[in-house]
Each structure stands twice: as C-alpha cells, then as structure tokens.
Amino acid sequence: MTKPLNIQFKALNAKTEDAITLFAGDKLALGKIAKDYDQRSQKALTKSAKAVGFTGKSRSFAHILAPANLPVNQVLLLGGAPKKDVTSADWTKLGGFLANNVASKNATAMSVIFDFARGEASVDDIADFALGAYLRIYKFDKYQKPNGAAKNENGGSKLARLTIHCANPAAATRAYKVRKAVGEGVHIARDLVNEPANILSPVEFASRVKALKSSGLSIEILGEKELKKLKMHSLLSVSQGSKQPARIAVMKWMGGKSKKDAPICFVGKGVTFDTGGISIKPSAGMGDMKGDMGGAACVTGLMATLAKRKAKVNAIGIVGLVENMPGADATRPGDVVTSMSGQTIEILNTDAEGRLVLADAVWYAQEKYKPKMIIDLATLTGAVIIALGKEFAGLFSNDDKLAKQIKQAGIDTDEKTWRLPLSPRFDKMINSTTADMKNIGGREAGSSTAAQFIKRFVKDGTPWVHLDIAGTAMGSPKTDINESWGSGFGVRLLDKLVADHYEK
Ligand code: BES
Ligand code: MN
Ligand code: ZN
C-alpha cells in the first residue's frame, strides 16, 4: 500500500517546502502572502494565471514552474476561499483535489498556505481539507512491483508529506488528530474491500480484526464450535459449501460515560466471496464479489475510528464472516434451516445469502448486547444499484428520527443515503409455504423484500437502520477523495452520526 500521507501544521511564516500551494479567490483575489510572492517574482503568479485562464474558481488551479526570485521550485495557485456556503465536505473535496494534482506534479512534499484575500478558514475547515488530502493519497498497490508497468500506468503518487501553514497550527493539529482517526478507519475499510478473496478468508478477516486490539478495541472471535452452540444455522448454511470456516468477529468500544449505558450495535455482512453458491452467479463481473464484505469492512473501519479518536460512546461492531461457495456440502435450493431466533427459513436461492448471515448476526447482537439501536450495513442486493446507482446507499428503517439523523450525516459527509420503503405488503412476499419465511421475494422490490427479511429478526421496539451499500462500497467512481475500487463508504457517515448525536 502507498504509505499514508504525513500531514503537519506550521505557522504561516515558517519555512516552506520546495513546492507551495497558495489560494486564490474569485477574480484571482490573492491574500497578503500570495501577493507578496507575486510581487517578488515579478508577477509570475498572476501572469501565469492569466495565461492559462485561471480565475480562482474553486477546484481549478494554475501551475507555475521555477518562478524567478522565489525560494521554491513550483507554485500551485489553487482556487478556493472561505465563504458562507462552503461546507465541511467542500473543504474535504478541495483537499483531495489538491493532493491529486500535486501527485501528478512530481512533488514529494508540499506546503499549503492558508491565507486568503477575504475571510479566514476555521481550524475545522483546515482539518477537513487535510482529511481530504489524506483520503486521496491511497492506493491499493501491494501486489504491484514498485517500478512495474502497471504501477506507472496508474501514475503512482510521490506525495509523501503535506505541510499546512496556518494562523493557529497547534489548534489545527488537535482538530486534525480526530480527522486522522477517521481517515485511518476509511483506509482500513478500503484495504479490506480491495483485498482479494484468496487472501481475505473469514479467518484472515478475523485476524485483521484482532490486530485492531492495539487501537484500544476489545475483540472476541466466535469460531464454528461457538456458532453451532449458539444455533446460528442460518449463517452457517452460507459457508457450509466452502472449505473456509465461518467466523463472527466482535469489536467493543466502551467509551461512554457509563459502561452500563446500552450500546449502539453496528452489524456488517462479511461474505468474503459470493459465488452465489449452488444458485451460481454468471461469470461476468463475478470478480467483484470479493467486495461482498463491504458492510463488515465498514463496521471494522468505523470501530477502529471510534477507538482511535476515543469517542465518548458505547459501541459494538459485529461482523458475520463467511464464504459462499458451491460444493458437495453446499445448501441446496429448497433446504430449510432454523435460525438462532428459532424462526425457520426456506432457502430458495443460495445467492440471497447476505440476509441469512445478517439474520443470525442481528439476532445475536440483540440477545447478547441489548443495544439501544442497531445499524446494519450490507452489500445486499443488485436491485439497489438499479434503483439508486453509485451515489446513494439504500436506507431502510423502523425509526423516523434515526433515519433522518443518518440522512443528514450523509449530506454533511457526502456519503449520501436515500430512504426506501418497508411495508407489510413486502413482508407478505417472503412468506413461505414450507417454513416461516423464504429468502427471496420475487423480482419486484428486491431491496425492500431483502430489508423486510432482516426486519423479521429485529425485536419490536429496537430502533434499526439497514443500509444497502451494494452500489456505494465497491466499484466506486473516482472522486476527489477516492480513486480506489473500494470506497470505505459508511465510515465517515456513521462516525458523523455518532459524533453529532450519540456522544456525551
Ligand atoms: N452480494 C450480492 C448483491 C450484490 C450484487 C452486491 C452486485 C454488489 C453488486 C447478493 O448476495 C446477491 O447475490 N443478491 C441477489 C439477491 C437475489 C438472489 C434475490 C441479487 O441482488 O441478485
Ligand atoms: Mn449473493
Ligand atoms: Zn452477497
């Protein structure tokens, strides 16, 4: 993996790196420091800007090489300025935009000078900007030779250090410490999603979870023996055709005021590879199913973040880890299993396996931890990609207040969700003639019938949200803050939810 970007904060007048970024506002408005650089270089900055038609528009830049009389070898004039309508997410995107463009300019170290013609960026703005840069400098390149053709084609970034010069570097350092915990959590989630399934088996996933003990989490791993004892036959039915044994990994962070306060439970689908089982998937695109543990990856990254930033919350992360393979022992369509809850399930399609995992993991969460609410994340249905594409995760909930809080956190972090319906009508579609329910509901409303299935394992009175992240967790379009296949979707969203509403 590309080494994470090292970010530090210094005073405005501290010595800079050889490459610097200066901000320009609308109509090329320059702050005092930028003006001074411009003067000293005989207007090299403003002349270059005019020559390339750069006017200070946000997310655009002018690149000035070897300006005369300046102690630097390159200057990036970056469009952007503090304004009322510039949000936290905008600063994050701008930081990512800069990091991406520096990366293509051969610089290994860059100074960014937070000085503007008008207004001032707050310490939070600066920290958000830094987070964007941190997130953008991520590549899953561990299987590529350092100087190999493939790597060069990807334009491996050389940017290793970002120095941010600002009015209050001590306060910015403090604010960034929290953001960095978030950035690290996102990188953990991306690493897990990007990792191929021959390496990332359920057992390997569990051991990566164990390694997070060093971040302050308490970890518990349930092996096959324990899962059988708990009667998780729904979850176990998914992995019975695979040589890889199932695991549940539990991550605990009890940072709340009292250890007795009911925790929030985050539950993730962790199908390390989904062939579909006996209801096997077509070949085209099947490789993407290495990312079918995107929900579990998010829960893992989120729990790491909460621990790293010592969030004042009690939270439990539970990930159900299985591999869905065809094999002599695999589940046959038509088989009936008894879930941990006692409800029976007729498995008519072995490719609708995520809900079988969640059924037991969600039930276990309630039995064991009596949570104040449950949020599950899963790359659950192809149908949600058809409905919402790659910009929005599907949100299902039995609790309007919680649904609204998550929607807002999504707007604030730009990890957007869109609420889709649950309904007794959809519930009816999963009634079985043989068992208490069947695991498919037909072609119509595929994401809603899947959510409805999970709801049957949520006890009355427990606020619950299900996020279908099939479209947002993997196969991600390139953005200012991510160029990798796995996005780490959900870590920033749920960290924000916790920070805004559930920390005392
Ligand atoms: N993991 C898939 C859903 C998925 C599809 C995620 C594409 C990401 C990209 C899930 O296990 C699945 O196979 N769902 C089926 C359900 C159907 C059999 C009812 C689907 O969506 O086709
Ligand atoms: Mn499937
Ligand atoms: Zn799946």
Image (cartoon, rainbow, N blue to C red):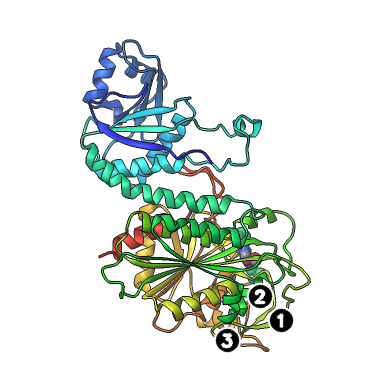
Q: Quadrant of ligand 2?
A: bottom right
Answer yes or no: do the residues labelled 1 and 2 have beta carbons within 8 Å? yes
| Residue drawn at x 42%, y 49% as measured from the top left | 184
Amino acid at the residue labelled 3? Gln
Examine the rendering and report whether any part of residue 331 can be seen: yes
Q: Residue at x 32, y 19 (%)?
A: 46
Q: Residues within 10 Å of mark 3 (few under 14, many from 20)?
A: some
Q: Which amino acid lies under the numbered mark 2 shown in the image of this protein?
A: Ser
Q: Is residue 182 left or right of residue 84?
A: right
Q: Which mark is residue 343?
A: 3
In this view, 270 is above or below 366: above
Tell me what residue is drawn at x 37 percent, y 44 percent: 131
* Ligand 1 has an atom within 8 Å of the beta carbon of the residue at disc 3: no
Which residue is found at the position 36% from the left and 37% from the top? 7
Question: Percent x, y for residue 229?
Answer: 58, 81
Determine which residue is flagged by label 2: 237
Q: What is the secondary structure assignment of the residue under circle 1?
A: strand
- How far separated are the C-alphas under marks 2 and 3? 14 Å
Q: Which mark is residue 335?
A: 1
Residues 464 and 224: in front is 224
